[in-house]
Image (cartoon, grey):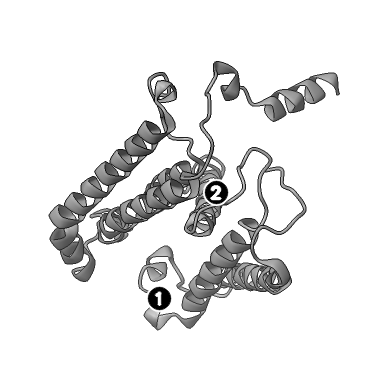
Amino acid sequence: MAARTDSVWLGSARKPVKFIMWASACGTCILAIWLALGTLFLGSDTNMKQFLAPGDAPAVLWTLVLAAVALLSASIYMSDRRGVIEPAPSGFFDIVSLVCARLSMLATAGIVLVMFLEVVSRYVFEKPTLWANELSLWIAGFVFLFSGLYAMQQRSHIRIFIIYDLFPRWLQKLSDILSVLLIWAFTLLLIWGGYNEAVAKFFRWETFGTAWDPPIPATIKPAILIIVLLVAVQALSNLLADWNKQPEVHLPVDDIDAHEIELIRKNIGD
């Protein structure tokens, strides 16, 4: 993503966050290489099942801890730069949503890496994995949820302006309030209906029932409730941030990404 050079919100904390990101990423890579070399040449019995229960494998545990720190710090660091097509954060919850959005971007790259490893393992070495498909599904579930939060923050969800633009400003505000109330009603009803099931799945650590057997139900079900709640908070943040804005007129030309067109023209010219 192309980005501007100014800091969005970290300010002087940007450099420490960058250092933590690179240090934890390098530590993760070193430990991952060590585990791989140990398995290939030193007779280590490290396997992917240990990544689901790393209590008895300190090296695996530290790899997961450093990877989590690297992902979180990278998401925070990347959220401090605004993309060319992104509006400036204006709501009280925007930064949280941007951090989650950057995490989903990194997770998408993770899915590509996992599937690449699976293709190489299956078709080059004829040793397909037992975990790549489940891991990609697991990550994709979180990507889907975080993408919804990002779409709400960017106001890029489907909106129909044909009638809305005809309203006077007071009626537009009333429509916005009604929309947010409906979102919150849906969220509260979803939590009320799904809370007990989500808690039960989490505390019994329900697994997927496959050879690798990851705890996809135990993590995705609570994540649905939590992230839908975050979407509702973001909707309220949008309402407050847009309250004093002047009326806008939405035209078909607004959907044209001028920056993207310019990049296409440049690439064709090159």
Q: Quadrant of the N terminus?
A: top right
- Residue beneath the point at 74% across and 48% down: 4
Label 1 Cα neighbours within 10 Å, binned few <14 / some 14-19 / many ≥20:
some
Q: Any mark on residue 105, and which? A: 2
- Asked whether residue 67 is in view, the answer is yes
Which three-letter amino acid code belongs to the residue tagged 1? Pro
- Asked if labels 1 and 2 touch by Cβ distance under 8 angstroms, the answer is no
Outermost residue on the right side: it is 270
State the image coordinates of residue 63 (x, y, percent, origin top left): 53, 73
Label whose residue precedes the other's in the sequence (2 or 1): 1
Relative to the observer, which residue lies in front, 28 or 157?
157
Q: Which residue is mark 1?
A: 54
At label 2, counting other C-alpha atoms closer than 10 Å, the crowd grade (few under 14, some 14-19, many 20 or more) is some
The percent position of residue 261, horizontal first and vertical second, equals 71, 23
Element carrying mark 2: helix
Q: Name the residue nearer the viewer: 263 or 4.
A: 4
